[in-house]
Amino acid sequence: MTATGQKWSLVSIKFWEWMMPLYTFVMTYDGRSYVAQERRSNFTGFTTSWLRDIPVSTFPTLTTALRSELQKKMVFDDSKFTIIPNRKNVWFKQVEIAGQPFITHVVQTTD
């Protein structure tokens, strides 16, 4: 329900999704890369959704336990996404997983 008590319809939800910015996530780990895109109001509040959607075959050395560790580090680690200097709407974050860097670049994309 909305703040005014109106029920959300599928049409209104799709409209609001369309109005949200599109983010492109470029992830690199263990010599492999993966690119994902999602429409969200912000990219930091929905980190677990795009991490959860990474196909297992993309990063085969990322076991279930390591995926869990990755999600925790991406969400709760003290390091934040850093704005890349001299670029507009581009962020970066790196965390260590099993001694290897997991690097994520986020770009607010225009479609």
Image (tube, helix red, strand yellow):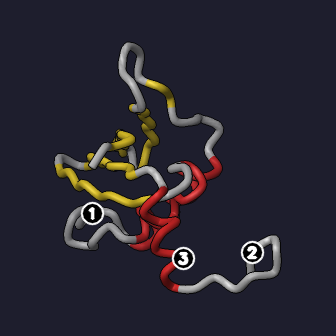
Q: Residue at x 27, y 73 (%)?
A: 56
**Does 1 sit left or right of 104 as displayed?**
right
Check disc 3 and give the amino acid type: Ser
Give the image location of residue 90, x and y in percent: 39, 32
Secondary structure under the numbered disc 1 in the rendered image? loop
Q: Secondary structure at mark 2?
A: loop
Residue drawn at point x = 51 percent, y = 63 percent: 48
- Give the foreground label among 1 and 2: 2
What's the distance in space between the residues labelled 1 and 2, CA to CA? Answer: 43 Å
* Quarter placement of the N terminus: bottom right
Check disc 1 and give the amino acid type.
Thr
The tag on residue 2 is 2
How many other residues sit within 10 Å of disc 1, few (<14), some (14-19) or many (≥20)? few
Q: Earlier in the sequence, mark 1 or mark 2?
A: 2
Q: Residues within 10 Å of mark 3 (few under 14, many from 20)?
A: few
Q: Position of residue 7 (x, y in %)?
A: 70, 86
Residue 54 at x, y percent in the picture = 32, 67
- The residue carrying mark 3 is 12
- Considering every residue shown, the one lying at the far right of the view is 4
Q: Is residue 10 visible?
A: yes
Mark 1 — residue? 61
Distance from the alpha carbon under mark 3 to that under mark 2: 11 Å
Q: Quadrant of residue 6?
A: bottom right
> Which amino acid type corresponds to the residue marked 2 in the rendered image?
Thr
Looking at the image, tell me whether mark 3 or mark 1 is earlier in sequence order.
3
Judging depth in this view, the residue of 7 and 68 nearest the camera is 7
Residue 101 or residue 50, whichever sits in front: 50
Give the answer, above or below, for where 92 lies relative to 76.
above
